[in-house]
Image (tube, rainbow, N blue to C red):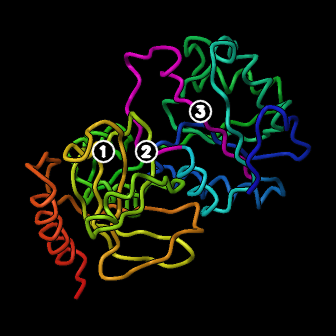
C-alpha cells in the first residue's frame, strides 16, 4: 500500500476509489473496501481510499467536531491490512473546503484518476456540502466518472455507524464496539518514554500518546499488546494518571506475567478487550500498587490467563 499526499499527485494509474473519514473502520467500511478491491481487480485498475486529516468538522465547525474513534496511524495500518493499493490523505483545510462540487469531481478524476467512485447513500461533498449523490452522477458524466451507491450495512436491523461506536466508547463498552468493528478495538502508536514510575513500583508499562480527543472512556481495561509479531496479555490504563501527576494523557499497558524487552521497539498496537474500572486517584503509591494487583487479577480472568 502506498500512502500519498498532495506532493505525490497526480497518480499515473486509473483507480476505483472510495472516500470518507473511515474513523471507526467498522464492518460497513470493510464491506465498501472489499467492493472497491474486487471492482478494481475486475476492471484492471488500482484500488484507492481517500481520507481526511483532520476530520473536516475540526476545521469547519470545531465545536461540532466528533471525538476520535482512532488515530491516523491506526487507520493507515488497518487500510494496509486490507491490501488497498493507494491511500490519499487529504490535508483538510479551509482552502480545500472551498472546492465547488465540480472542482471536487475534477480533482478526483484528473489528479487521482478515479474512474469509478463507490460511496454510501448519504455522501456529501464540495463547498458547504452542496454536492450529493445526484450531483456526483450528473457532474460525473462530464468527467467519465461512474458513481456506485452502497446501502447502509446493518447488524440485527441496526445500522452500523461511527456515531453508535462513539457512544459505546464514551461508556467504555469496548466489548460491543468490537462487535460493530468486526475486530478488537485498538490504537497504534509510537512508544513514549515516560518517567519510569511504573517500572520503579514493580509494574513496568508500555506507553503511547493517544489523540487528545479520543472518544474512549478513561479507566482500566483488559487487553493485549502486539509488537514484533507477538501478542501479550495486558492490563491497560487510559487516562491522566491522577495518583502520579494528573496532567498528561497516556495509554499505558502492563504486560501480564512476562518481562519483555521493548527498548528497540518503536511501534506497538494496544487492543482493548473489556472495561475493568473507572479511573481513580489513590491516597498514595502503596494503595495504587494494591489496586494494580487487583486489576491484573481481573484482567487475567477476562483474558483467561493462568
- Closer to the camera, 299 or 206? 206
| Res. 53 mark | 3
| Res. 210 mark | 2
Q: Is residue 58 above or below residue 84?
A: above
Tell me the distance, in whole angstroms, between the alpha carbons under discs 2 and 3: 15 Å
Q: Are marks 2 and 1 in contact (CB under 8 Å)?
A: yes
Q: In this view, does 104 lie to the left or right of 29?
A: right
| Res. 57 mark | none
Q: Quadrant of the C terminus?
A: bottom left
SS at circle 1: loop
Q: In this view, does 29 lie above or below 127?
A: below
SS at circle 3: strand
Q: In this view, does 270 lie to the left or right of 103?
A: left
List the single residue furthest toward the right.
12
Q: Does the magenta stretch include residue 285?
A: no
Magenta range is 47-71
Q: Is disc 1 surrounded by few (<14), some (14 to 19) or many (20+) residues within 10 Å? A: many
Q: In this view, does 205 lie above or below 89?
A: below
Residue located beneath label 1 in the image = 216
SS at circle 2: loop
Q: Residue 200's quadrant in the figure?
A: bottom left
Mark positioned earlier in the residue sequence (2 or 3):
3
Give how far across and how far down residue 133 sits, in percent.
59, 27
Amino acid at each position: 500500500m502506498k500512502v500519498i499526499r498532495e506532493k505525490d499527485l497526480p497518480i499515473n494509474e486509473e483507480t476505483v476509489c472510495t472516500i470518507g473519514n473511515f474513523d471507526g473502520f467498522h464492518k460497513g467500511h470493510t464491506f465498501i473496501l472489499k467492493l472497491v478491491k474486487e471492482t478494481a481487480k475486475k476492471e484492471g485498475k488500482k484500488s484507492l481510499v481517500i481520507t481526511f486529516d483532520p476530520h473536516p468538522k475540526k476545521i469547519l465547525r470545531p465545536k461540532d467536531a466528533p471525538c476520535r474513534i482512532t488515530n491516523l496511524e491506526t487507520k493507515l495500518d488497518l487500510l494496509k491490512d486490507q491490501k488497498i493499493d493507494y491511500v490519499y490523505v487529504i490535508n483538510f483545510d479551509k482552502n480545500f473546503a472551498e472546492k465547488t462540487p465540480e472542482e471536487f469531481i475534477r480533482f478526483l478524476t484528473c489528479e487521482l484518476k478515479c474512474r469509478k467512485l463507490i460511496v454510501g447513500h448519504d455522501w456529501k461533498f464540495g463547498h458547504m456540502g452542496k454536492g450529493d449523490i445526484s450531483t456526483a452522477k450528473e457532474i460525473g458524466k462530464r468527467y467519465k466518472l461512474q458513481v456506485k451507491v452502497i446501502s447502509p450495512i446493518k447488524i440485527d436491523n441496526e445500522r452500523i455507524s461511527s456515531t453508535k461506536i462513539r457512544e459505546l466508547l464514551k461508556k467504555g463498552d469496548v466489548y460491543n464496539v468490537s462487535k460493530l468493528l468486526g475486530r478488537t478495538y485498538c490504537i497504534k502508536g509510537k512508544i513514549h518514554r515516560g518517567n519510569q514510575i511504573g517500572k520503579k513500583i514493580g509494574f513496568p508499562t508500555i506507553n503511547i500518546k493517544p489523540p487528545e480527543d479520543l472518544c474512549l472512556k478513561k479507566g482500566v481495561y483488559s487487553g493485549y499488546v502486539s509488537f514484533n509479531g507477538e501478542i501479550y496479555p495486558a492490563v491497560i490504563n487510559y487516562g491522566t494518571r491522577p495518583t502520579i501527576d494528573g496532567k498528561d494523557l497516556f495509554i499505558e499497558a502492563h504486560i501480564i506475567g512476562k518481562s519483555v524487552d521493548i527498548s528497540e521497539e518503536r511501534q506497538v498496537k494496544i487492543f482493548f478487550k473489556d472495561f475493568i474500572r473507572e479511573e481513580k486517584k489513590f491516597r498514595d503509591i502503596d494503595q495504587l500498587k494494591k489496586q494494580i494487583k487487583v486489576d491484573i487479577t481481573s484482567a487475567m480472568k477476562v483474558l483467561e490467563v493462568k
